[in-house]
């Protein structure tokens, strides 16, 4: 069943506007009477029936159900900015897997160092990718893609449990992650990884070093591998 995100739903009517309305009317060629699933970011799915197409598409809300697609634990990915379009791939796959929030991170070894204006343009693109991935994968929310932060700013946002994937070694995820903790943060470096002083800085703020094995993974592989293992250990894969 086609799935779309809307503004908060209150009552038995909902509207879809803009690109999604055009997609429903012109691309999917849905007609009045056909069913779709709506999500308003509250963690619920709404079964709805199209009343009118066009812009806006008008829908009747038939049923409200708790979403079964959201992980029980909320994972925040602090991803150091990589080169090129690798961040787009990381965002897309992380959202598909179930990450709750993605925070772009500026570290000493980041080759990509966009100015504020360029970063704003990137954020627009990143958030669109997150929204598309959320629709495709059946998420009940669109994960947040936050503004760029420094390492010093990042440690002010940490939940009780935080890990950094470090090519220099650390504890196995199986010994660190088990069901129960509601929130986790994960740090992943850019192409050059983290500097030793950055790892020490994170450790002083309670971030535990974790290993993803003996092989050194690319910066776009590490978050996907790490998140997959964590979600499996947390019981969501």
Image (cartoon, grey):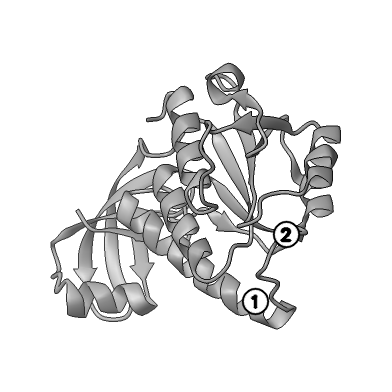
Which is closer to the viewer, label 1 or label 2? 2
Circle number at residue 220: none
Q: CA distance from mark 1 to mark 2?
A: 21 Å
Give neighbour class at mark 2: few <14, some 14-19, many 20+ (Cα, 10 Å). Answer: some
Residue beneath the point at 83% across and 38% down: 200
**Camera-side residue of 155 and 229:** 229
Q: Quadrant of residue 159?
A: top right
Q: Judge from the rendering whether residue 165 lies leftward or rightward of residue 23; answer left or right.
A: right
Residue 16 lies, in percent from the top left, at 35, 70
- At x 40%, y 55%, the residue is 134
Name the foreground residue: 102 vs 138: 102
In the rendered image, the vertical position of residue 131 relative to residue 181, given as above or below: below
Q: Position of residue 212 (x, y in %)?
A: 54, 33
In this rendering, position of residue 114 left or right of residue 231: right
Residue linked to disc 2:
109
Residue that label 1 marks: 120
Q: Give the residue at x 21% y 67%.
A: 51
Q: Quadrant of residue 66?
A: top left
SS at mark 2 in the image: loop
Can residue 215 be seen in this snapshot? yes
> Is the residue 185 above or below the residue 86 in the image?
above
Judge from the rendering whether residue 117 lies leftward or rightward of residue 25; answer left or right.
Answer: right
In the rendered view of the protein, which quadrant contains the C terminus? top left
Can you tell which quarter of the image residue 228 is in?
top left
- Camera-side residue of 146 and 90: 90
Instruction: Classify mark 1: helix, strand or loop.
Output: helix
């Amino acid at each position: 069943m086609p799935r779309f995100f809307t503004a908060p739903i209150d009552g038995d009517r909902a509207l879809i506007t803009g690109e999604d309305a055009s997609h429903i009317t012109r691309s999917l060629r849905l007609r009045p009477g056909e069913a779709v699933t709506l999500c308003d970011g509250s963690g619920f799915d709404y079964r709805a029936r199209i009343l009118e197409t066009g812009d806006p598409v008008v829908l009747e809300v038939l049923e409200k159900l708790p979403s079964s697609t959201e992980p029980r634990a909320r994972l925040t990915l602090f991803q150091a900015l990589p080169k090129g379009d690798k961040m787009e791939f990381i965002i897309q796959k992380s959202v598909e897997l179930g990450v709750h929030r993605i925070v772009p991170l500026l570290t000493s070894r980041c080759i990509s160092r966009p100015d504020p204006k360029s970063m704003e343009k990137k954020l627009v693109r990143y958030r669109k990718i997150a929204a598309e991935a959320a629709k495709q994968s059946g998420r009940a929310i669109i994960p947040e893609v936050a503004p760029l932060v420094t390492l010093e700013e990042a440690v002010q946002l940490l939940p009780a449990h935080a890990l950094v994937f470090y090519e220099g070694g650390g504890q196995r995820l199986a010994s660190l992650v088990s069901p129960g903790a509601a929130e986790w943060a994960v740090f992943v470096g850019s192409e050059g990884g983290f500097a030793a002083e950055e790892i020490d800085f994170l450790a002083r703020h309670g971030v535990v070093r974790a290993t993803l094995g003996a092989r050194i993974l690319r910066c776009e592989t590490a978050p996907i591998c790490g998140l997959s293992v964590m979600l499996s250990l947390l019981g969501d894969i």
